[in-house]
Image: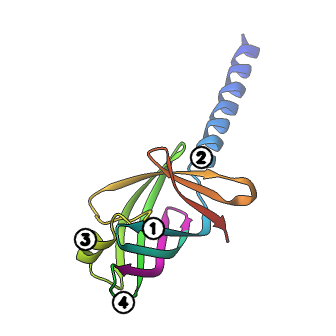
Amino acid sequence: MRRLLIFSGVFMTLSLVALFLTVEHYNKLDVKCRGEFESHIDASTLIANVGVNFEKGRGILTIAGRFQEGNNALEYIKIATVFNYEVYGKLTYIKVSQQHSSISAGDIDSKLQHLLPMVFSSRDVEYVYEFQLQNGGDYLIKQHGIPILYCKKV
């Protein structure tokens, strides 16, 4: 009887340690990468670089590039979004805390919304992404199972 109690206690302790380490592993997301993209819709064009940095529950997404609408002059834009995130299994839940931009929020919504691969236009919404680790430490970022950005490790 005594052996059974000792064995049960040791087994339970090892199980709890394994569970804690597994949860800790999956809740850790340390991403520092850069990507680039080119989007075209009708006569509008956006060519930009994306910087992604996730670390210890906080992150920043930076998009900088050139935007041209029709025959208008080129406009240089920069959008920086600071956010909090939590990881549950394969999914990352992002909630915006600050956003700074070289253009107005109205212009982002009216002109750029459909040209951007990732944009967080509301603080009241929790965005969900999947970060798939690739060879060499790169990430494929997906939303609803659709790849939206390949991000190379920095």
Q: Residue 121, relative to residue 47: is it above or below?
A: above
Q: For marks 4 and 1, give the CA distance.
A: 17 Å
Dot 4 alpha-carbon crowd within 10 angstroms: few under 14, some 14 to 19, many 20 or more: few
Please tell me which residue lies in front, 8 or 112. 112
What kind of residue is marked 3? Answer: Ser
Q: Quadrant of residue 104?
A: bottom left
Question: Over which residues does the magenta segment extend?
Answer: 53-69
N-terminal of the two: label 3 or label 2?
A: 2
Nearer to us of marks 3 and 2 is: 3
Q: Secondary structure at mark 3?
A: helix
Q: Earlier in the sequence, mark 1 or mark 2?
A: 2
Q: Kindly indicate whether the residue at mark 1 contacts the one at mark 4 (C-beta within 8 angstroms).
A: no
Indicate yes or no whether the magenta region holds residue 56: yes
**Closer to us: mark 2 or mark 4?**
4
Distance between mark 1 and mark 2 Cα atoms = 33 Å
Q: Which residue is mark 2?
A: 26
Which of the two marks, 1 or 2, is nearer to us in this view? Answer: 1
Residue at figure coordinates x 47%, y 70% from the top left: 61
Kindly state the secondary structure of the residue where label 4 is placed. Answer: loop
Q: Amino acid at mark 2?
A: Tyr
Q: Residue 73: which numbered mark, if any?
A: 4
Is there CB contact under 8 Å for labels 3 and 4? no
Counting from the top left corner in percent of width and height, residue 149 is at 54, 60
Q: Which mark is residue 68?
A: none
The location of residue 73, given as percent across then percent down, is 36, 89
**Alpha carbon distance from label 2 to label 4:** 46 Å
Instruction: In the rendered structure, find residue 39 and report the number of the disc placed on it.
Output: 1
